[in-house]
Amino acid sequence: MTAVREERIARELRRLRGKYTSADVQRALGITPSKLSRIESCKVRPSPQDVKLLAAFYGADDATAERLAKAAEDLKRPVWWTEFVGPDWSSALGYHLELESEATRIDSWTIDLVPGLLQTRDYSTALMTSRVDVPSDQLERRLQLRERRQERVRDGSLELWAILSEAVLYGQIGGPAVLRGQLEHLANPPGNVTVQILPFTAGAHSGLGTSFHLLSFADWPPIGYQDTIQQGLYYDDPDVVNGLTRTIDDVRATALSPTVSRETIARRAAELEG
């Protein structure tokens, strides 16, 4: 499951090649047109040495060549989620997990659910058991996978900024006790997590009608993501990503401050006691 890394290397090499033909590459480096085509179309895993040679020949600076070579070296690194994701699960899940594992920050705007990386086990259980597409014999494995994904939140290596519609505070997923536990969890986030509530009183705003997430990376452009019932939609077109960025920034500015949001969440959790 290295599709994301391979695609990024291939895309950047295609961009860097610019005016050079495959014949130019063969004359300079001895890499045949067929091999170059397989590298650029992700049909073969490129070696770090080939990637570095190609990037340097195309005129990339040393830092870019080293970054791409390191990315190629990382293709050999085993991925942790293979112990959870079996052949009976969607291959798209591996693609998402790879993106999530490489992200340094995720900004989320959600209108009806707590984002998965911030869900308690009871809240996740209630969601999964309500879905017709989650077989009962997969439930525990899916819960374990979600908890494993949350490790980067707990250890501080992933920054999260979650903006939630006030509706999330009232949707009694799993019942009052489960929702209360989830809200108490949200009201006391670790330092790498920021939670904001967009109140009903905000009225019309840029984020109406759809939830989405923005994933940011140390060495690659950001990617937008939207969840649907059947599949996830990913956006890497700069214009689309810029539009999503402007939208979430507008929602962020409209939402309650993080401090007031925590107080609002805690107050709603207290209403569910008893």
Image (spheres, rainbow, N blue to C red):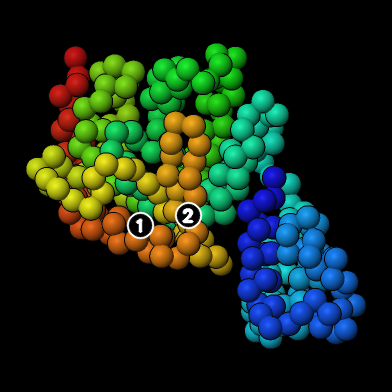
In the image, residue 123 above or below residue 104 = above
Residue 10, percent from left and from top: 69, 64
Q: Given the image, on which type of amino acid does mark 1 rest?
A: Leu
Labels 2 and 1 touching (C-beta < 8 A): yes
Which of the pair 245/82 is nearer the observer? Answer: 245
Identify the image quadrant of the C terminus: top left
Disc marking residue 11: none
Circle 1 Cα neighbour tier, 10 Å, few/some/many (<14 / 14–19 / ≥20): many
Which of the pair 158/210 is nearer the observer? Answer: 210
- How many marks can you see? 2
Would residue 25 be found to the left or right of residue 103 on screen?
A: right
Residue at 69 percent of width and 50 percent of height:
2
Identify the image quadrant of the N terminus: top right
Residue 6, percent from left and from top: 69, 57
Residue at 55 percent of width and 65 percent of height:
220
> Earlier along the polypeptide chain: callout 2 or callout 1?
2
Q: Quadrant of residue 43?
A: bottom right
Q: Quadrant of residue 110?
A: top left
Would residue 72 be found to the left or right of residue 102 on screen?
A: right
Separation of marks 2 and 1 at Cα, in angstroms: 10 Å
Q: Given the image, on which type of amino acid does mark 2 rest?
A: Tyr
Disc marking residue 235: 2
Residue at 40 percent of width and 33 percent of height:
119
Can you see residue 69?
Answer: yes
Mark 2 residue element: strand
Mark 1 residue element: helix
Residue 162, percent from left and from top: 33, 47
| Residue assigned mark 1 | 244
Circle 2 Cα neighbour tier, 10 Å, few/some/many (<14 / 14–19 / ≥20): some
Q: Quadrant of residue 138?
A: top right
Residue at 67 percent of width and 25 percent of height:
88
Can you see residue 188?
Answer: no
